[in-house]
Amino acid sequence: MKETIRLFQRADIPEVVALYKEVFPATERTGTSDLESYFDIAFFGSPLSDEAGGSLVYLGSGGSILGFLGIQPRRLSIRGRALHAAVCTKFMVARRAGINGAAVRMLRNVFERPLDLVLADLANDPARRLWEGLGGRTVMLGSLSWSRALRPARHLVSRLAKRRLIKSLALAATPLADIADRVAARRGLPWTAVPVGHTSEDLDPDTLVACLPTVCGERPLRPDYNAGSLQWLLEVISDASAAKPLRKRLVRNAKHEVVGWFLYFLERGGESTVVQMAACMRSAEAVLQVLLADAWSHGSVVLSGRFDPGFAGPLSAQGCALSQGPWMLVHSNHADVLDAIFSGEAFLSRLEGEW
């Protein structure tokens, strides 16, 4: 049998899960039944499933699955024009398959589809080289991450605990670190207080869909959710990070106007991760402050997220540190789409990325 590529089918899930555990043995998602549920929801559950053309499997000469490229459809819009987009995720090839040849064939297949944008945002160096070799590009701004220690003493102790020689000493110092952070909070820390007149409340998908055109109206390129596609996406990301609750909060100003929202995975006593943060341009600082206060009040030690140029000023003002994260990669034949992305004007949060 000749090596070939074909569309991923539900019946392939057990074999793809086995490949995933072979290629990524250190994955936190070790339960096979959980993985099978994830692959079913992530690649067959979307109401937009036909729009991107489907995920791919690479079959070896013996007929077994030796490669996989997951494709998740997305709808975006740019200045009112609808865009059909796709996210590449869970890209994997068994070493025995000849990684480069199989990977090139699968990715080229996706690039040749009639899509307005192809995106990946958790890419490593080999994936970046492959992507750029086929005509794709790296988004440097989208490859940056920010972080803010909300409990600085506890954060320092947790970092020291990663060093084997002083781990026991660092762990013993944890209670003292907690006391130091409580004293500092009582003296007033900028991220513990909500801006005057601003409130937050639970955010539901319908409200997010309704408010996005207004709140993100200054962004030329942005997601184009409907209730079904957003609900599916939230289900996928929750399934991908089942150990952490997803907090979803809507932010209002003193006039009770919606000025933004945020979604983040909460890890009490650890690092919480922002999935999406949106704000009207004039309210970016206030929304970030509400987010930081919310994460602090719920026990986060550190808050982190992907850098968004629209929040550059507020992130700097709050003392957030920037670092290199995974690569964000894009492929598009539309100059206006690429211009919006590389200028930093696009609203492409982690929610639009790989899951």
Image: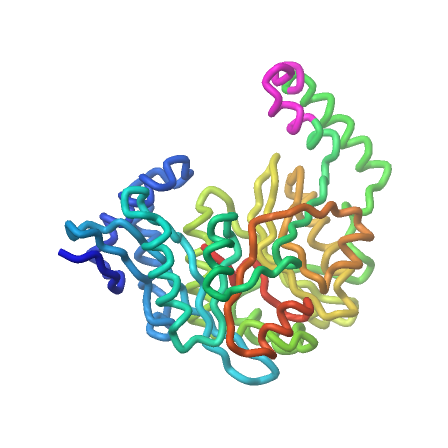
**Camera-nearest residue between 240 and 132:** 132
Is residue 341 rendered magenta in the image? Answer: no
Question: On the rendered image, what quadrant is the C terminus found in?
Answer: bottom left
Residue 150 spot, x, y in % from top left: 72, 40
Please tell me whether residue 188 is drawn above or below residue 257 in the rendered image.
above
Please tell me whether residue 199 is drawn above or below residue 48 in the rendered image.
above
Q: Residue furthest bottom?
A: 80
Q: Residue furthest right?
A: 187
Residue 33 spot, x, y in % from top left: 28, 44
Q: Which residues are magenta?
A: 157-170
**Camera-nearest residue between 315 and 1:** 1
Residue 258 spot, x, y in % from top left: 69, 70
Q: Residue at image x 35%, y 41%?
A: 23
Q: How many marks?
A: 0
Q: Residue at image x 76%, y 32%?
A: 181
Please tell me whether residue 320 is drawn above or below residue 9 in the rendered image.
above
Question: On the rendered image, what quadrant is the N terminus found in?
Answer: bottom left
The answer to whether 308 appears left or right of 319 in the picture is left
The answer to whether 240 appears left or right of 63 in the picture is right
What secondary structure prevails in the magenta region?
helix
Please tell me whether residue 181 is drawn above or below residue 123 in the rendered image.
above
